[in-house]
Image (cartoon, helix red, strand yellow):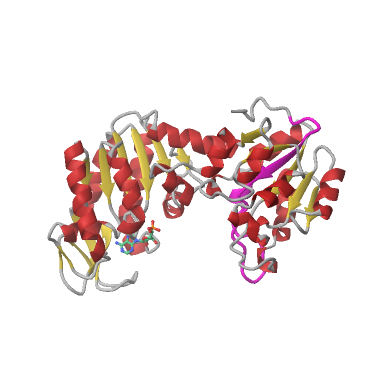
Amino acid sequence: MISIHNFNFNSKKALVRVDFNVPLDKETLQITDDKRIRAALPTINKILSDNGSAIIMSHLGRPKNGPEDKFSLKHIKSRVEQLTGAEVHFSKDCVGVDAEALSEKLLPGEILLLENVRFHGEETQGDEAFAKQLSKLGDCYVNDAFGTAHRAHASTCQIAQFFPNAKMCGFLMEKEIQSAKAVMEDTKRPFTAIVGGAKVSDKVLIVENLIDKADHIIIGGGMAYTFKKALGGNIGNSLCEDDRLDTCLEILKRAKQKGVSIHLPEDSIIADDFNNNAQSKTTESNQIEVGWMGLDIGSNASKEFSDVISKSKTILWNGPMGVFEMTSFQGGTKSIANAVASATKNGAYSLIGGGDSAAAAKKFGVDQIVSHVSTGGGALLEYFEGKTLPGIEAIRA
Ligand code: AMP
């Protein structure tokens, strides 16, 4: 596999697939958070400082039937200009004669930003002819879009075949792969996985796969109550997926067979409404009365979980421990964030992934302390579910 570190982009036109799917203000269409653009800067800057030019491909939002102004990448052109300091040209279509002419004229040190690749339905269909058209614009291919690595789309996957000797991962993608490997392949033990969030059904595959790898699995958040009910507990009005009770028992059984410790929250902060100002109190997680719901882990659970985390050498965290968006129910997630940060300071490798856990890490000020906060939600989940990611495979092939 070619490494971007050794590749010289001098006089080359590099087609770079990035994930510039940034949030835009609905009214003004101004960028509200540019971290995804910033995350791709090391790759873009390397290309430009080598005296090459960058042709940037990305999607933005989920356009259904062709072009839609609110999903146009033209809204982000000036921010790319500002952040790179380079001249940025914009192509109103990502393929076709105009795009080809703009690419032809592009000078070293300049950027050509292509319009949203998803304005063509062929992108998400992984259409080969469309990928070939895109490939005509550059003479090497860099994939730096980990967030879409689990999609076999034209610009993330099929396009790579047209650059058999000039395809590579960008710096961000490389960092994501290294972090995921540090957890799953070069695992230092004990390895603790912390899984939370709303639904068991979203996390079943990852938990099942982790049973083969982890020493401890901590389960918190709304999903913990389905486990509690499966074990015969009373969970009142807490979140529950009744069709997953057997799955929970199966997971607990397999974990026991494999010698993996599963930690469920002993106590919970419960509320009489899904509301920050609701009445609340602490109780055992399996003795929640009807009319009450568990919205956060309790202090005993926080203590037990933090204790396990403090003794771990590898930590993976996906999903909050409670409704951390509400101040009354953020304490559990905050204490876990702090425990992961302390363990990292003591030498553990920690990877936080998934939109909500990344937001929680930022909210509680540990995003700069942990080893890595992944930019990939779905892609990271699929990696830890044991699936291969087409975007990465295409570079390797
Ligand atoms: P997920 O996207 O599955 O990772 O779930 C994240 C969401 O789960 C967050 O918005 C949390 O507010 C929510 N959540 C976490 N714990 C609970 C809970 N005990 N009850 C209801 N929602 C929860």
Q: Position of residue 121 (x, y in %)?
A: 64, 61
Residue at (39, 43) in percent of width and height: 384
Residue at (32, 43) in percent of width and height: 209
Image quarter hosting the N terminus: top right
Q: Nearer the viewer, residue 346 or 148?
A: 148
Image quarter hosting the C terminus: top right
Q: Position of residue 157 (x, y in %)?
A: 59, 44
Farthest front residue? 129
Residue at (64, 57) in percent of width and height: 122
Image quarter for ligand 1 equals bottom left
Q: Position of residue 331 (x, y in %)?
A: 32, 55
Q: Is residue 123 magenta?
A: no
| Span highlighted in magenta in the image | 9-37
> In the figure, 34 relative to 162: above or below?
below
Q: Nearer the viewer, residue 372 or 247?
A: 247
Classify residue 117 as left or right of residue 23. Answer: right
Residue at (64, 30) in percent of width and height: 4
Classify residue 93 as left or right of residue 178. Answer: right
Could one spot residue 377 in this view of the protein? no
Q: Position of residue 116 (x, y in %)?
A: 68, 57
> In the figure, 165 relative to 328: above or below?
above
Q: Is residue 12 magenta?
A: yes
Classify residue 164 as left or right of residue 287. Answer: right
Q: Which is the main secondary structure of the residues drawn in magenta?
A: loop
